[in-house]
Amino acid sequence: MAVLVVFLLAGIILGAFSTLLVRNFANRYGLSFGPLSNRHVHTSPIPRLGGIAIFSTLLILYGAFLFAGRYGVLRRAPHPDVLKILAPGIGLFLVGLWDDLRGMRAVFKLLAQIAGGCCLFYSGVQFTCFHLSGAPVWINSAICLLSTVFWVMLVCNAINLIDGLDGLASGAALFSMVTIFTVALVQGRYSVALATLVLGGSMIGFLVFNFNPASIFLGDSGSQFVGFMVAGLVLAEAQKQQSILDAFFIPLCSLALPLMDTVLSVLRRFLSGHSLFGADREHIHHKLLELGLTQRQAVWILYGVSATGALLSLALLHPSHLMAVPVIGVLLLVLFYGVRKLGYHELKEFQRVWKRTTQQKQVFALNIALRKAMAELRKTADFSRLLDLLQDCLHKDFDGFDLVIHPEDVSEETLDLRWVGPVQRIWNNGYQEKIFFTLELTTPKYGLVGSLTVHRQAGRGWLLDTDLLAGELQAAIGIAIEKCVSCAPALLTTQPLEPRYS
């Protein structure tokens, strides 16, 4: 245990010192950058090369651990899984560093993540619990490969996307490392625990200069490298677990905040028709700033969410898997009500669609009643019957209607055409604010002959299919009016009908 404490302190000190050197070097040689898009909240040029400090700290200290183990200074032998993760992690770091210095399209970073995931899989660091009983070996291998690559892509992009406020991404990743370290230590995988501890120590040292007001940022080199290392260390632990709960849900809870932000980003952009890889100011941390919080307040709140996820994930280490139900339930409730508070427009639209889906039985009933009324309308030649049918099919979704026929629009010389109406029927004569929806009425013979205006209380849910209302019902009323005129032209020479309330 004393060795772990020494390496933790060394990681913090070396991480802070390396971050200071990288920051000063970047400022001196013009490697600081102002905001590159409207999603960035900083206003002055700040270096984006913090990943170099974290990468070099881990490389130096884990190299010291390997050296000490090789020459007998430490009795603990290094675990090969850490080297299997670190080797492709170097590639992810270099890809991120190139993006920080020269810029790189998102698709190339995505390909680098896929390549890193494949390297982990073929080196044996993979999900091994996703197997279909009785399936051929190649199918189970494909499932493991896809799940491993997907996990790497998910975590790398989650850490990258949440890197929007000073200290947020590094702090969120740090809380997840607490879970990884605890699981590895409890289950006796000393090398994995030490690598996680050194990475966490370097993140703490980096946070000294990254917390608000930050003088250096993590950058893509840092977010890609840290995300890949976290994903790989989770896989190193997952392949030793016997159940999906231990292998999957524990890391899922520990990374709840960045993963939720990623899922929300994909869902938002998909629902709004925007590019899935585009940048925006709609992340969770941006929404907290819109609510009037300062950067520090927003980060502390999100630290609290990350700490809650880490604590809940540790609760799943209990031998009884019955703990999974309350743990996951509490986490989902926290995330659900937290996201609702942020007021995403896309999620409100999703809720509206979901509500509409649950009302489909009512929608079906109203649409069927409307279709039956339309069938009757096409047959009727009686004006009073026409009005009764309209009221029958509209009364559940509307408060009333006005039917207006313009005699100047009916150009039949044989008819003495004056005015019918306006005919008004109201069955819910409240004083609430109203919404009016007007349809122009046409007949096959006379063309435009008038209009139908339906009105309803504002704020009520709309159940009728508007295509039926503004299409087939509109046409059916026109046919009925033409039949009424042809069969009983005297109707058009009567005095205006009084409004009828029912």
Image (cartoon, grey):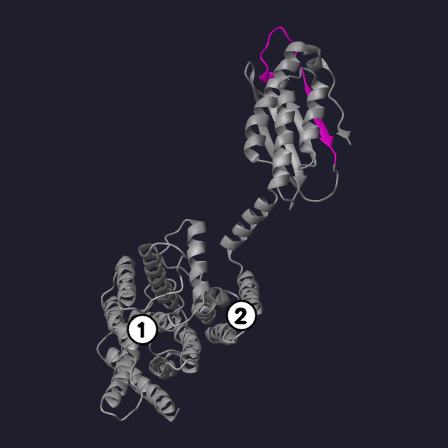
Q: Secondary structure at mark 2?
A: helix
Q: Is residue 424 magenta?
A: yes
Q: Is residue 475 magenta?
A: no
Note whether 53 is above or below 108 in the view shown.
below
Note whether 450 is above or below 355 in the view shown.
above
**Quadrant of residue 110 in the image?**
bottom left
Label 2 with label 1: CB-CB less than 8 Å: no
Q: Secondary structure at mark 1?
A: helix
- Total number of numbered labels? 2
Image coords of residue 70 (percent x, y): 23, 88
Instruction: Give the position of the C terminus as an image quadrant.
Output: top right
Note whether 138 is above or below 302 in the view shown.
above
Instruction: Pick the residue in front: 194 or 69.
Output: 69
Q: Which residues are magenta?
A: 408-427
Which mark is on residue 222?
A: 1
- Identify the residue at horizontal 43%, vertical 65% (top origin): 259
Instruction: Give the position of the N terminus as an image quadrant.
Output: bottom left
Horizontal side of 86 relative to 435 (left or right) equals: left
Circle 2 residues within 10 Å: few <14, some 14–19, many ≥20: few
Image coords of residue 312 (percent x, y): 52, 73
Circle 1 residues within 10 Å: few <14, some 14–19, many ≥20: many
Q: CA distance from mark 2 to mark 1?
A: 35 Å
Note whether 26 is above or below 113 in the view shown.
below
Q: Earlier in the sequence, mark 2 or mark 1?
A: 1
**What amino acid is at disc 2?**
His
Farthest residue to the top: give it.
Answer: 414
Residue at which label 2 appears: 321
